[in-house]
Amino acid sequence: LVVAYDDAGGGVAARLWWMLDNLGHRRVGVLDGGLAAWTAIGGPLTTEAPAWPPASLHLRGRWSRVIERDELRRRLGRVTLLDARAPERYRGEIEPIDPAAGHIPTALSAPFTDNLGSDGRFRRPSELAERFQELGLGVGGIAGRGSERDRGGEAERIVVTSCGSGTNACHNALAMRLAGLPDPLLYPGSFSDWSRSGLPVASGPEPGEPA
């Protein structure tokens, strides 16, 4: 059993969860509430680095449920693209890392912190489902490499989660799993990869149109 935790709302721990889960290691989870929740119940802390004996880890040889820049560019407007970064970075008001400010055209602002309650722990599955439904996801949302399909007269859209560098985006993937929604695709390079490629960037509160 692998349990990942951090002191950043799970935004980093979720990346390790995604990596192991994606490659087939099913016994992996994220400590809900992270280090703060652990210390709140009086959990012990140590400065010692543990030494575990070597073990075998059998994983798949390649990633699945990922989408790269060129494929995403071709599909803009036909996928639901979620941006897990802070709202002010999405709007382009600040950009401390990347060469351009704003977001990938058509992306919806879906900051990963909105998956958490005031106590820093994940919201209930029903609340997470409601959150993603408000973003346009639901039973009809799918995540796979196939083309869009149609069920009951409603088009099913592939969901792609992104952020700055493909880390916090995994928090939305975990929240969708908790909400009972299909797994999204991950854009590993995310906005850092997109903005460094010279492709168009949108700014402001609206998703914008595909170039």
Image (tube, grey):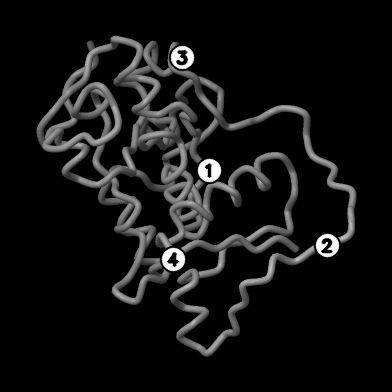
Secondary element under disc 2, as helix, strand or loop, is loop
Nearer the observer: mark 2 or 4; the answer is: 2
Q: Are marks 2 and 4 in contact (CB under 8 Å)?
A: no
The three-letter code of the residue at mark 4 reads: Pro
**Mark 3 / mark 1, whichever is N-terminal:** 3
Q: Please say if the residues under marks 3 and 1 sit with CB atoms less than 8 Å apart.
A: no
In the rendered structure, the answer to whether residue 180 lies left or right of residue 49 reads left
How many residues crowd mark 4 within 10 Å: few (<14), some (14–19), many (20+)?
some
Q: Quadrant of the N terminus?
A: bottom right
Q: Which residue is mark 3?
A: 71
Residue 163, x across and y down, in percent:
36, 37
Q: Earlier in the sequence, mark 2 or mark 4?
A: 2
Q: Is residue 181 left or right of residue 86?
A: right
Tell me which corner region of the image, top left, top right, bottom left or bottom right, holds residue 120.
bottom left
Q: Could you say where residue 159 lies in the image, as x and y percent from the top left? A: 42, 35
Q: Secondary structure at mark 4?
A: helix
Cα separation, mark 3 vs mark 2, equals 41 Å
Q: Of the two numbered discs 3 and 2 on the same chain, state the one appearing first in sequence.
A: 2
Residue for badge 2: 52
Name the disc covering residue 125, or none.
4
Which residue position is annotated with label 1? 183
**Most extreme residue toward the bottom, as rendered?**
42
Name the residue rendered at 32%, 70% in the picture.
117
Marks 1/2: CA–CA distance: 32 Å
For marks 4 and 1 on the same chain, the one whose residue lies earlier in the sequence: 4
| Neighbours of disc 3 within 10 Å: few (<14), some (14-19), many (20+) | few
Q: Earlier in the sequence, mark 3 or mark 4?
A: 3
Residue 172 percent across, percent down from the top left: 42, 49
